[in-house]
Amino acid sequence: MKIRRFYGKDMRDVLKQVKDELGGDAVIMSNKKHADGIEIVAAYDKEPDAQLPRQTKPQVENSVNAQRKTPTLSEIIGDNGPDSLKALLEKQSQSVTTQTEPLVQPERPLVTQPVQQQNSTPQEHSALKEMRQELSSLRNILQFQISGLINQENNRKHPLHGYLVEKLLQMGISNTLAEEVVAYAPESANEREAWLFLLKLLANRLQTKRDDILSQPGVVALMGPTGTGKTTTVAKLAAQAAQKYGAEQVAVVTIDNYRIGAFEQIATYGKIIGCCVKKAQNANELSDLLYQFRNKRLVLIDTAGFGQQDARLIKQLDTIKQNSCVTIRKYLVMQANCQYRVMQQTIKEYRQISLQGCILTKLDECYSLGEAISVAIENKLQICYLTNGQKVPEDMQPADTKFLIMSAAKLYKKFGLLHTETNHITNAAVAV
C-alpha cells in the first residue's frame, strides 16, 4: 500500500488531485485544515498508472515531498503484520470510495475563499461527517492492533516482566502501577525472587500512619460515601479511646440528619461505651458543641454518607469547612472491596477538603486488596486503620504495610489463581 499527501486550496481541489493521481479506489486516511488550504493523506493498494495527468509545478513538488517523507504502511507495521489489517483497509477502501466519489465527480471552478467561509451542502456535510467517523473507527482499530503487536514483542523480549505484570493485575494492582514497579525488577532474578522483590517495593511505596487518631488528642471527622461503615468505625474508635483514656474523655457528635435512625444508632453505642453523644443540625450548632467539648481528649464527628454526585455532599463539606473554633482532622472511610474507579472518584470528590488519611473497612468481605493498595499509592493517601468485621471494638486495628501487602498476596493466591484457572478452562472449552 502507498501513502501520499496532497495539498490544495479547498476540499474539492484536493479530492480531484487524489482521483487524478490515484484513481477512484484511493482511501482517504486523514484530512487537516491549514491557514492556506487543506491537506489530505490518501492511500492506494496498487501502483498508480505510469502515465499520470500533468499537474502544476507546486502540486508535483508537494506530491514528491510527501512521497519522500511519508513511510508506507508496510514499513510502519512490518511485513509480517496480521492479515486482519489488510482486510480492514480493503473494507474501509470500499466504504470510503463510495462516499468520496460524489464529491469528486462534479467539475466546478475552484473557489479562492478560505475553507472556513465555504458553504457546503447538507449532503456534503453529512458525507464528510460519516467519512470522519469511519476514519476515526479505523484509526482506533489500527492503534489497538499495533499496541497489541508491541505488547507481544515486549513479552517476547522480556517474558518474566510480562508474567509479573499479569500476576500483579490478577492481584488487583492497577495497570499503570504494575508496569511501573515491574520496570524495577532485576533481570537476573528468578520468578520467586522477582515476585518477592515487587511485594517489598509495593510495601515501601504504601504509606501508613499507625494509630494516628487515638494517639493524638483533638477533633476528628470521619467522612465517606454511604455504606462504608462510618458509624460503626466511630463506635470502634470511641470504645478503644474510652478503654485507653476513660469514657469521660471521649465525646461523639453526629451531623447525619438524613439517614433514619442515625442518631439513635450512635446514641446506643454511646450508652454502651459510657461517652457523651450529641447531634448538630448545622454549622453553628457544631461549633457550639465543639466548644462545649473543648476539654475532651478526643471528639469524633460522624457525618452523613452521600454519593459522589449528590449535591448534599457539598453542603456537608461546607459545614465542616465553616467551623473556625477548632481544627478538625478529616479522615476518609472507604470500603476495601470497592471498585478501583469508584475509589478514585471518591478521593477526587473529597480532596476539596484536606484529608489527613483514610480508613479501609470491610477487609473481611474482600476477594482482592490490590485495588485499594493501588489507589492509596497513586494518591499518596496514608492508611491509618483497618476494619474487618462488625464487632465493637475488636474488629479494628492500626494499619500496617506488611500486613496489607501479605493479605493482598494471600487473597491473590486463594482467589486470583482460581480465577485464572477458570478462564483457561473456559477458553479451552470455547476453542473445542
Image: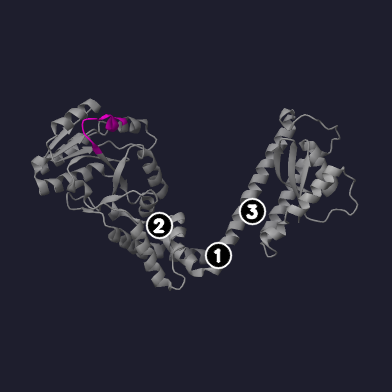
Estimate the x, y position of residue 102 in percent, counting from the top left.
80, 38
Q: CA distance from mark 2 to mark 1?
A: 22 Å
Residues 12 and 87: in front is: 12
Q: CA distance from mark 3 to mark 1?
A: 18 Å
- The residue beneath circle 3 is 142
Answer above or below: position of 46 versus 8: below
Estimate the x, y position of residue 131 in percent, counting from the top left.
70, 41
Residue drawn at 46 percent across, 56 percent down = 175
Name the amino acid type tagged 2. Answer: Gly
Name the amino acid type tagged 3. Answer: Leu
**Element type at mark 1:** helix
Packing grade of label 2 (10 A; few <14, some 14-19, many >=20) is many
Packing grade of label 3 (10 A; few <14, some 14-19, many >=20) is some
Estimate the x, y position of residue 10 in percent, counting from the top left.
77, 35
Estimate the x, y position of residue 344 in percent, counting from the top left.
40, 46
Name the amino acid type tagged 1. Answer: Asn
**Among the 4 quarters of the image, the one containing residue 113:** top right
Q: Earlier in the sequence, mark 3 or mark 1?
A: 3
**Element type at mark 3:** helix
Packing grade of label 1 (10 A; few <14, some 14-19, many >=20) is few
**Element type at mark 2:** loop
- The residue beneath circle 1 is 154
Answer above or below: position of 314 versus 84: above
Magenta segment: 318-328
